Structures are given as C-alpha cells and as structure tokens.
Image (cartoon, helix red, strand yellow):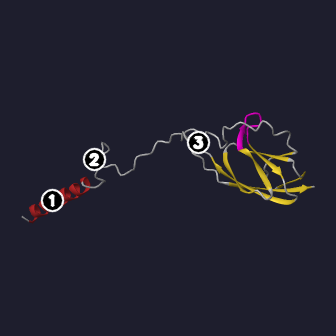
Amino acid sequence: MPLRWHQTFAKALCLGIALMLLGCGVSSNQSGGGNSFPPIPKKTPNPSFPARGCSDAQPPADLGTPAVVLVPASQPVAATVQAGAVIQIHFSPNYRWSAEELGGLTLIDPAGYFDAAHNACVWNLRANATGMHQLQFTGDPVATGTMTTTSRSLIVGFAITVTA
C-alpha cells in the first residue's frame, strides 16, 4: 500500500509541475501567443528630413568669392579676414548642423545648404565687427535610409580675427 501512495503522489506532483509550466509566459491576444519578446519595430526613413543634414536650399546668387573657406578639424581652426569679407565653412553632410555662437559675424541665408561639388553643408558668414570672434557649431548625426547611426554629436569651434 505505501508504494501506491508514493506513485500517486509522484504522478500528482508531475502533473502539477507540468500545469504550472504550461501557464508560464505572457498572455497575448496576438498570434505570437506567449512570446515574451516585444516586436521589433521597423525602421523607416523620416520623410520630413532629407537623407543628409543639409537643407536643399540654393546658394545665394550674389555671394561673391569667400575670403576664406574653413573645414572643421580636431583642433579649433583659426583665420584672419578683413571687415566685410565672406567666410565660408564646409561641414560634413552626415550631421545636421546648428550655430551655437557666431560672435560678431552675421549669418548669410540660406544657412547649411548642400553643395554637391564639395559634398558639404555650406555656411556663409559676413565679418562685420573687427576683433577676435569665437564661433561654435553643433552637429547631430543624421540617420540615413533605414539604418540608424551610433555616432555622437560633434562640437566644432573656430577663432576668427577680423581686421579693419
């Protein structure tokens, strides 16, 4: 008799464990049933932004030739120009750029247009006030196509001296 009791208890214990395991998982009304992993979102391009960080605006027609063309480097870039001169900056089109500090320089619109010949976002500034001016720009990475980027934002500085 004791053997029968042990067999019954073992069968009941196994049945209880099996029922508990069947009840595990996330309840769901979707076809995935008890799948505990969230669905993977599909990445699609955002149609409100171009695939690059530049605007599609056309360059100003009456700009003239810039006195200096600057390209960001790992160290702040310095330049000296005369008052009234145009300073042109070429940024990577893989970032959406914004001006944080322009010193005594005036932005010439449109700011950050795409120049296909140089594959760059171009910013033009006019040197109005004499003296030393610190410029600072921030570039936020742009996701291209259906891929997102793991790049970090960039901060770029320029030191411009304007003489009379």
Residue most extreme to the right: 164
The label shown at residue 12 is 1
- The kind of residue tagged 3 is Phe
Tell whether 22 sits left or right of 56: left
Residue most extreme to the left: 1
Residue 108, percent across and down? 76, 46
Instruction: Check disc 3 and report its element: helix, strand or loop.
Output: loop
Q: Which residue is mark 2?
A: 29
Inter-mark Cα distance, 1 to 3: 63 Å
Q: Nearer the viewer, residue 100 or 8?
A: 100
The residue under the point 50% across, 42% down is 43
The residue under the point 83% across, 59% down is 133
Q: Quadrant of the N terminus?
A: bottom left
Among the two numbered marks 1 and 2 on one chain, the one whose residue lies closer to the N terminus: 1
Q: Which residue is mark 3?
A: 49
For the residues carrying marks 1 and 3, which lies nearer the camera in this image? 3
Query: Label 1 neighbourhood size at 10 Å, few (<14), some (14-19), many (20+)?
Result: few
Residue 100, percent across and down? 71, 57
Q: Nearer the viewer, residue 33 or 152?
A: 152
Among the two numbered marks 2 and 3 on one chain, the one whose residue lies closer to the N terminus: 2
Residue 106, percent across and down? 78, 52
Q: Nearer the viewer, residue 104 or 115?
A: 104
The label shown at residue 35 is none
Tell whether 56 sits left or right of 47: right
Residue 117 lies in the magenta stretch: yes
Among the two numbered marks 1 and 3 on one chain, the one whose residue lies closer to the N terminus: 1
Query: Label 2 neighbourhood size at 10 Å, few (<14), some (14-19), many (20+)?
Result: few
Tell whether 29 sits left or right of 79: left
For the residues carrying marks 2 and 3, which lies nearer the camera in this image? 3
Give the magenta-colored segment's residue range. 111-121
